[in-house]
Image (cartoon, helix red, strand yellow):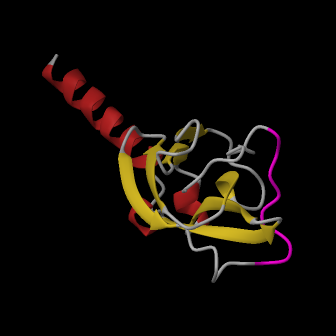
Amino acid sequence: MKRSLQLASSFILALLLLAEPVNANPADLYLKNTGRYSSGRYLWTVYVAGEESAIAQISYVEYTLHYSFPKPVQIVRERGSKCAFGLSSNSWGEFEIKAKIVLKNGQERYLTYWLNLLNNNTQDSACSTTQSTRRSARKSGPR
C-alpha cells in the first residue's frame, strides 16, 4: 500500500513538471500598443508581448480601461494572429491600462501600462483585429 502511494505521488509530480514548459517565464510578459490618428481620435490596439513560450501559457487577459469607457473592463480570450490577446478601441488621449493575465495553470499576473499614442503613432496598425477582439469606445475614452 505504501509503495503504491509513493508511485502514485511520483507519477503526479512527473505530470505536473511535464505540464509546465521549461523555458517559459510568464514574468517576462509585458504590454505594447499601436496607435493611428484619425478624425480627432486615436485608433489603438493594446496587446501582450514577450517570449512565444510564455504567451502560449496565457488563458485570457482582462483589461481595465479608463473609467469613462462604456465598458471599462474587457476580457480577451482569443489569442489572435499578429498581436497576442489584442484589444482595439479609440480615444482622444492617453491613459493608464491595467491588465490581469490569467495563465492556463490558474496563476495570475498583473500589469499596469501607459497607453502611449504619440510614440506609437503609425499609419497602419501592426495588429490585425478580428471582429471578436475589436471593441469600440463610441465617443468615449478619457475626457
Instruction: Say which of 11 and 66 sits in front.
Output: 66
Relative to residue 36, is residue 70 depicted above or below? above
| x then y, percent, for residue 106 | 39, 38
Left or right? Give the position of 82 relative to 65.
right
Stretch in magenta = 122-131
Tell me the residue at 57%/57% (across/down).
Answer: 55
Of all residues, the one furthest to the bottom in this rendering is 119
- Asked whether 124 falls inside the magenta stretch, the response is yes
Name the dominant secondary structure of the magenta segment.
Answer: loop
User: Toward which corner of the image does residue 22 lie, by quadrant?
Assistant: bottom left
Instruction: Say which of 69 and 30 sits in front.
Output: 69
Position of the N terminus by quadrant: top left
Q: Is residue 110 visible?
A: yes
Instruction: Say which of 127 and 16 sits in front.
Output: 127
- Asked whether 142 falls inside the magenta stretch, the response is no
Left or right? Give the position of 79 relative to 101.
right
Tell me the residue at 21%/23% (across/down).
Answer: 5
Of all residues, the one furthest to the left in this rendering is 2
Q: Disc count in the image? A: 0
Instruction: Say which of 37 and 15 sits in front.
Output: 37
| x then y, percent, for residue 124 | 86, 72
Q: Is residue 23 visible?
A: no
User: Toward which corner of the image does residue 4 lie, by quadrant?
Assistant: top left
Of all residues, the one furthest to the top in this rendering is 1
| x then y, percent, for residue 38 | 82, 67
| x then y, percent, for residue 40 | 76, 66
Position of the C terminus by quadrant: bottom right
Relative to residue 124, is residue 106 depicted above or below? above
Tell me the residue at 83%/58% (across/down).
Answer: 128
